[in-house]
Image (spheres, helix red, strand yellow):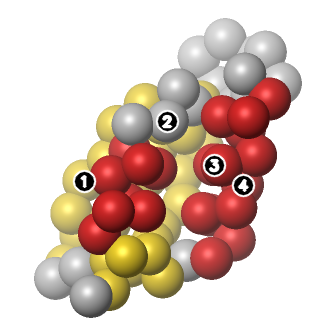
Amino acid sequence: MKEELEILEKYLKKKNLKYNEFNELIGNYFVKEYEELDDDYYLIKIVRPNGLKGEVYTDYIKVIN
């Protein structure tokens, strides 16, 4: 679980992800869902890792080549 959280934090800080990094991010345990906002921009809905059930926050990332 700690490793999943570290991966999530790393990618969210990065903001610009390659396609393979994006795939790893959306497969993360804490990612509830995602949707495309615009070309290459995605809204990521994330379950709060502190144990608050139902608590979700959002962030965005850009997928680059």
In the picture of the structure, the residue carrying the numbered disc 1 is: 35
Q: Earlier in the sequence, mark 1 or mark 2?
A: 2
Front tag of 3 and 1: 3
Tell me which amino acid carries mark 1: Glu
| Relative image position of residue 1 (x, y in whole percent) | 72, 22
| Relative image position of residue 51 (x, y in whole percent) | 78, 15
Front tag of 1 and 2: 2
* Residue nearest the observer in this picture, 32 or 21: 21
User: Badge 3 local density, few (<14 within 10 Å), some, or many (20+)?
Assistant: many
* Residue nearest the observer in this picture, 29 or 37: 29
User: Is 64 on the left or on the right of 17, as rendered?
Assistant: left
In the picture of the structure, the residue carrying the numbered disc 4 is: 9
Q: Earlier in the sequence, mark 3 or mark 1?
A: 3
Q: Earlier in the sequence, mark 2 or mark 4?
A: 4
Query: Which residue corresponds to the image point at 60% horizontal and 63% vertical from the top-left?
Result: 11
Tell me which amino acid carries mark 3: Leu
Q: CA distance from mark 3 to mark 1?
A: 17 Å
Q: Are marks 2 and 4 in contact (CB under 8 Å)?
A: no
Tell me which amino acid carries mark 4: Glu
Q: Are marks 4 and 3 in contact (CB under 8 Å)?
A: yes
Marker count (numbered): 4
Q: Are marks 2 and 3 in contact (CB under 8 Å)?
A: yes
| Relative image position of residue 57 (x, y in whole percent) | 60, 44
Q: CA distance from mark 4 to mark 3?
A: 4 Å
Up/down of 45 relative to 60, above or below: above
Front tag of 4 and 1: 4
Q: Earlier in the sequence, mark 4 or mark 1?
A: 4
